[in-house]
Amino acid sequence: MSRRVKRPHFSHEDEKKLLEALGTARDWVTKCGAGAEYSSPRYRTCKAIQSAIDGLAEELTGDRGYFCLQAHSTPTIYRHEKPKP
């Protein structure tokens, strides 16, 4: 009779630490790929790793663009809208 191996518990804190480490790794992979010739094996490998990291981030957070820079929104006072009284 074989015994089942219990899977280790992966807490919310563990997910936060993993996302931080993935962010650091993604930054380094991006830099490595940026220095490679377009469509070279290194470039393609870096892109594949970025995609895998984004996929895992999506699994953990529900947002595939978790590590992508997002533009700041324009404050309301600078929009062409009249302020609400």
Image (cartoon, rainbow, N blue to C red):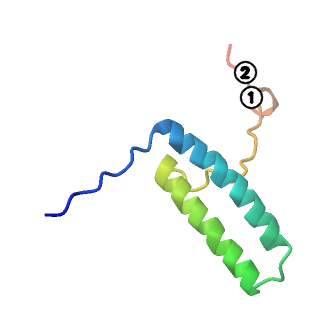
Query: In the rendered view of the protein, which quadrant contains the N terminus?
Result: bottom left
Give the crowd class for mark 1: few <14, some 14-19, many >=20 residues within 10 Å. Answer: few
Q: Residue at x 77, y 36 (%)?
A: 74
Residue 2 x %, y %: 18, 63
Q: Mark 1 sits on what residue?
A: 76
Query: In the rendered view of the protein, which quadrant contains the C terminus?
Result: top right
Q: Are marks 1 and 2 in contact (CB under 8 Å)?
A: yes
Disc with the residue nearer the chain's start (1 vs 2): 1
- The front one of 82 and 50 is 50
Residue 52 x %, y %: 57, 66
Q: Mark 2 sits on what residue?
A: 83
Q: Nearer the viewer, mark 1 or mark 2?
A: 1
45 left or right of 12 in image:
right
Q: Quadrant of residue 79?
A: top right
Residue 26 x %, y %: 70, 59
79 left or right of 47 in image:
right
Q: Residue at x 73, y 39 (%)?
A: 73
Q: Secondary structure at mark 2?
A: loop
Tell me the amino acid under the disc marked 2: Pro
Query: CA gap, disc 1 to disc 2?
Result: 8 Å
| Residue at the top extreme of this rendering | 85
Q: Secondary structure at mark 1?
A: helix
